[in-house]
Structure formats: C-alpha cells, structure tokens
Amino acid sequence: MKPLLEVEDLVVDIPVAGGDLHAVRGIDLSVEKGETLCIVGESGCGKSLTSLAIMDLLPTKARRHAARIAFDGIEIQSLRPRQMADMRGDRMAMIFQEPMTSLNPSYTIGNQLIETYLAHRRTSTKEARDRAIDLLERVGITAAASRLAHYPHQLSGGLRQRVMIAMSLMCEPELIIADEPTTALDVTIQAQILLLLAELQRELGMAMILITHDLGVVARVADKVAVMYAGEIVEAGRATDVFASPSHPYTTGLLECIPVPGKTAPGARLGTIGGIVPSLVGDVAGCAFRDRCRFAAPTCAEPAPAQTASVGHSYRCWFPEGARMPSTVEGLVHGH
C-alpha cells in the first residue's frame, strides 16, 4: 500500500544578505493513512518550513525543490495554484502555530468556519452552519451556536485553538499538519488540546503530522518520529524504536535533557547540549552536528551517510553507535 504522503529530497532555500539560507536540506518522509508522524527538533531547524513547503504556503522569496511531493499519488508540484487551493483545506489541512493571530480578527468565528466549508462543498449556508456547530461541540466548545457570532478577540487562547482545529476538520481532511499547536497555551490547556487531537484522529481516521520540540508529546502520540537538526532529518523510525535505542548523538542528547518520572531524582542535573546550531547560509559541508558532538572525528567534515539501526529505523552519522569513541576534542554533549 502506498503512503498517503510521500516527500523525497525536499529542499527549501531562502535568499538572504549573505547568500542562500539552506533551511531544509534534502529530507525524505512518508505518512500512512491514519498514522501520526511527529517531526521534532530545536527552534529554527526547519520543521515549520517543511510543513509550509508540503502545503505550498512558503514565503514568496523561498524556493522549493523536491524529487517528489505526492499526496495520495498526486504530484503536488505539478498542480496549478487553483488546483492546490482546492486540495488545501479540503483533503489536506493545517493547524497553525499561533492561535492568537491565525484567525481573521475582522470576521466572526461563524463566518470563517462557514466560508471554509462553502469554498470546498456545494451546499447551503444552513448546512455549513450546522456543520460548524457540530464541530465546535466535538472540539469541546459549549454553547456552540452562540459562539458563531463571536469575534476571535472575544475568545481565550485555548478556545481559539479549538476553533482552529474545528476549522481544519470542516471538510473531513485525510491529512492534518499541526505546527506546534499548543505553543502559546498554558500547560493544562496544552494537554487538553493534544488529547483532543489524538481522539479526533482516531475517530475520523486521519493521518497527522505533528510538529513539536517536546519529546514528551512525541512519546504520547507518535507512531513514527523524525528528528530534525539544521535542516536535515538526522534520525527517523518508529517512535518506540527511536526512544528505546536512539542512534544519533543529537537524539541521545535531546533525550538526556528530559526528566523521566520515577527515574530522574528530584534535584538531579539534566543533560544539556552545548554549543550553537551552525549557520546554514552559503556552503554547508559535513555533519552539521559535529561541533557539538562528543564523538566528532575528522571524518565528520564529510557529509554523513545514512545508516540503518533496524528495519525502518535510520540515522545519519559516520559511526554506527557501537563503533563510537569519544574524540580527543572535549565533549560538548553532557549526560546526567
């Protein structure tokens, strides 16, 4: 069975003052129907630009290249703008990172939900309104009918994000891309939103790409995980495999930074990853993580090859995990 979404060798370049910023560098990913793929990594690693490239919503100056971006066998790069607009919001939908600014402040919630449905369905305004009320109720908004007359500024951040989720579901998409959908919300609301997304996905059978920097979120909801660093996917596989046996030093470093209930003692020192992400402007050579890696060796100045840890679990590193020895350079990745 073919994946619902296939991305091969995706590149996103953005011209800046010093040359081209190589924001996304040759990534591959795939999502099956009903599956959850989590893309995880530090801020600025290219996660959001990857999602915008898939949805064809990149900034005007950004340049997208890919060997293949196929949704249900349809090559997205070959679609005309009108055809892509018809697919976007209908079969593919996106929940943006910032609920405070993603809704149009000039229109009521009802206007925006109903407009989405009418843009993709030949139906009456009444049917669209009924659909909007039903979805607002399903995402946990009480007095849904009266909420249709509200403007975004009259709702809290959590309610606005629920409206965004309802809007993304109006046309029953097969794929939802959620770009850090809980970033601006407090911890309690974050948990509610993530639980809601997981429940709706199971109920409706959607595929989901969840973009996050929170590995705790990944552990709870992901079927597959792709770890991004400096525009590349450095490790990918089933979430259970990646968490049980992380194979790239960056993934290991990320996991060492997370307190584990029942294992991490109160007051114990957490891991850190020292150093800074390298510049991706101009020529980028070798393993981008080498200046922060305790296993770095001269070989790492060359592009890292893909290695296989197990079936479906791959990573980009010169040294298979069992063959790694700390280099003579002082290690920058610190454990507990």
Image (cartoon, grey):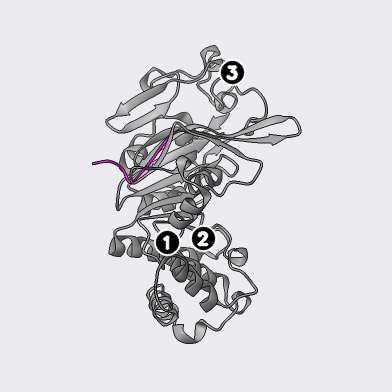
Q: Is residue 249 visible?
A: yes
Q: Which region shows up in magenta?
A: 1-8
Mark 2 and mark 1 in contact? Answer it, CB < 8 Å. Answer: yes
Q: Dot 2: what SS? A: loop
In the displayed structure, does residue 60 sit left or right of residue 36?
Answer: right
Q: Which residue is mark 1?
A: 194
- Along the horizontal axis of the image, is 313 left or right of 41? left
Q: Which tag, 1 or 3, sits closer to the chain's start? A: 1
Q: What residue is shown with label 2?
A: 182
Please determine whether, in this image, residue 315 is positioned above or below residue 37: above
Closer to the eye: label 2 or 3: 2
Quarter holding the N terminus is top left
Q: Residue at x 60, y 75 (%)?
A: 107
Q: Which mark is residue 257?
A: none
Q: List x then y, in percent, for residue 102.
A: 59, 63
Q: CA distance from mark 2 to mark 3?
A: 39 Å
Residue type beneath disc 1: Leu
Of badges 1 and 3, the one in the foreground is: 1
Q: CA distance from mark 2 to mark 1?
A: 8 Å
Q: Position of residue 169 (x, y in %)?
A: 41, 65
Residue corresponding to mark 3: 329
